[in-house]
Image (tube, rainbow, N blue to C red):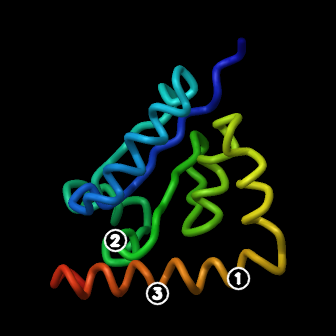
Amino acid sequence: MPRSPLLRVYYDAVCPGCRRDRARYERWAGELGEGVQWCDVTAHQEMLREKGIDPRAALLSLHVEEEGGRIREGIDAYILLMRRVPRLRLLAWLIGLPGLKPALRRLYDGWVRRRLAREGRLP
């Protein structure tokens, strides 16, 4: 079986829900998850800056770096991750639909801002 290209995921490891989502992803991905490197945005701020990513933006939205260096953010980052897991591929396709994607983006952005504000971490 050919190796999937490496993905580097910049996520909020301080967030309990984000850590649970990561653990669930790793469980569902199995061996496919070995091609994913998880990086805490709070611990890798300088690396983010070097890649042109504002650490504040990385805290507010999931960022995924593809092997070639291309950065995907928000819903597009989730789609990229989900496409690797057979049980999530249909959901990845669904959330990428043109009519649904912008609405999900607004909901996601609002949810993250409320969570960070509640935790006193909103930049």
Q: Between label 2 and label 1, give the one nearer the viewer.
A: 1
Point out the tag, 2 or 3, that comes first from the N-terminus: 2
Q: Position of residue 93 (x, y in %)?
A: 79, 56
Identify residue for label 2. 59
* Residue 5 against residue 94 in the figure, above or below: above
Which of the image's four quarters has the N terminus? top right
Q: Are marks 2 and 1 in contact (CB under 8 Å)?
A: no
Amino acid found under the numbered disc labelled 2 = Leu
At x 59% / y 61%, what residue is drawn?
Answer: 72
Q: How dense is the environment of label 3, judged by Cα within 10 Å: few (below 14), some, or many (20 and up)?
A: few
Element type where label 3 sits in the image: helix
Point out the tag, 3 or 1, that comes first from the N-terminus: 1
Identify residue for label 3. 110
Residue 66 vs residue 83, the one in the foreground? 83
Identify residue for label 1. 102
Amino acid found under the numbered disc labelled 1 = Pro
Amino acid found under the numbered disc labelled 3 = Gly
Q: Position of residue 12 (x, y in %)?
A: 31, 61
Instruction: Examine the rendering and report whether any part of residue 123 can be seen.
Output: no
